[in-house]
Image (tube, rainbow, N blue to C red):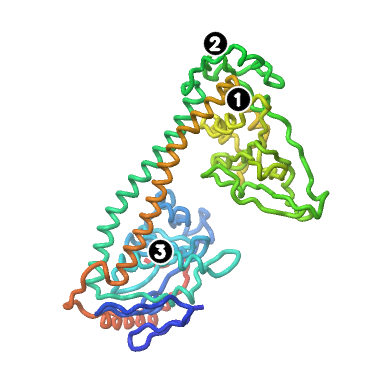
Amino acid sequence: MSNTFLKNNKMIMTKTDTTIRQNPRGWVWTRLGEVLSFIKGKKPRDLGAKTEYRNIPYINIEAFDKRVIDQFTNNDDYPICKPDDILIVWDGARCGLVGRGVSGVIGSTLAKLVFSEINSSYLFYFLQSKYEYINKRPRGVGIPHVDPNLFWNIPIPLPPLNEQKRIVGKIEELFIRLEAGVEALKKVKAQIRRYRQAVLKYAFEGKLTNSSSCHSEPQSCEGISDIAKQPSVAPNDLPELPEGWRWVKLGEVVNDIEKVNPKKNPDQEFIYIDIASIDNKQQRIANPKKYLGKNAPSRARQLVKYGDILFSTVRTYLKNIAIVNESYDGQIASTGFCVIRPQTNINNKFIFWYIQTDDFLNPLNQLQRGTNYPAVRDSDVLSQYIPLPPLPEQEQIVSEIERRFSVVEQIERIVDQSLKQAERLRQSILKKAFEGKLVPQDPNDEPAEKLLERIKIDKAKQTNKNKIKSVRIGMYE
């Protein structure tokens, strides 16, 4: 735990804390606990029709984070917050997350910060700059929360009030320009996503290839009608395919998967691939786990082979999809995957790319069952229809897809690097701001020491008058 105290207006800290620099002239060091208090929100106990609190607006953390608030606000009779108020997520996985208030709203895990004679935007940006520090040092196991001893001891550099306003003005000027660049980069990423789907759409409509291999090479089409185990009759509402192609159910062109029980070999180590092992941005197996047979998870039941495709049946829209490479040949996958093992006359990458299309995924997304873990069955996946051209054209299509994707992947890497640079620049702006390097000092400004004295007096008066504590929502105007 941090041990921080003031001596002659200079911050003295133990070696466990971050180094404190010399402040610019006219500034002063203090602690958050010296200048802040808070009111912690509490969800009404009874939201039923007979309670006086039934119309109190309430906001959860997700809405607060995403700024999607209107669906949680339907009444202004209990104005707990004002738009300029600063709220902080006190409990939960994102404790320390800071945002602005919304008139009439407070949530059970949101604390409203109470302060005087500090520019609210200056304090807001300072707390934003400390989010990682606060969030990485939460207290509690089940539901982590902000460690009060850490939070109230965070040192804050306090400039004169007029300089706070100048700093905020410069931060927001720079952030507006930075945000414009970030938005442009996000648009590029959105265009890349649309381009990928367009490539896949055209690929599986035969528009990336000649689609005439059955005419130029008749022998390549031999046996295409015999590929399926039990060929089905495709529904009439499926789109028309190029000549030589046909619609088949996915389950008709794949082989069965061997089920195993690793507990039968208790001392044998194996690699276990679960859904968390999939990097769904790179579409690859990234973080598999190792177990001894005796410690095998109950869902470790599917023996996978090189070339198999793992398709997560949980939250299919997340696209947790990957191909088993040589490193994982003979290892064990979770029953949370539909393991797709194409027959030898089917190019596995042709299947891999098709199952990522909207045409394949959208029907499955609609079939998902359950609330906490929405999922589909293997049978739902295997009953989906896929377009099937002759093998040579499958290979040509895969080649064309990967050639185009290799180009956009390079662009995407550049965009991602630029977004990371933008975030580093954001943090650099904040760092300079709170070091007094963003705007010049004005010797005519009132020194922050006098400002701090008034803040302490105000805080003492408020504490003596009414000790601030967690209260029932709706009790404060």
Whichever of callouts 3 and 2 sits on the residue coming sooner in the sequence is 3
Q: Does residue 85 appear to the left or right of 373 in the view shown?
A: left
- Mark-to-mark CA distance, 1 and 3: 50 Å
Q: Secondary structure at mark 2?
A: helix
Residue at point 34%, 49% (across, down): 182
Which quarter of the rendered picture does the C terminus lie within?
Answer: bottom left
Q: Secondary structure at mark 1?
A: strand
Identify the amino acid type marked 2: His
Q: Which one is in front, 257 or 464?
A: 257
Q: Residues within 10 Å of mark 2 (few under 14, many from 20)?
A: few
Hey, which quadrant is residue 220 in on the image? top right
Report which residue position mark 3 lands on.
87
Report which residue position mark 2 lands on.
215
Of circles 1 and 2, the one toward us is 2
The reply to whether discs 3 and 2 touch (Cβ–Cβ < 8 Å) is: no
Hey, which quadrant is residue 410 in on the image? top left
- Residue 191 position within the rendered picture, expressed as x and y whole percent measured from the top left: 39, 37
Q: Secondary structure at mark 3?
A: strand
Residue at point 67%, 20% (across, down): 227
- Residue 222 position within the rendered picture, expressed as x and y whole percent measured from the top left: 64, 14
Q: Residue furthest bottom?
A: 8
Is residue 393 visible in the rendered image? The answer is: yes
- Residue 376, disc: none
Q: Residues within 10 Å of mark 1 (few under 14, many from 20)?
A: many
Report which residue position mark 1 lands on.
385
Q: Does residue 111 appear to the left or right of 141 in the view shown?
A: left
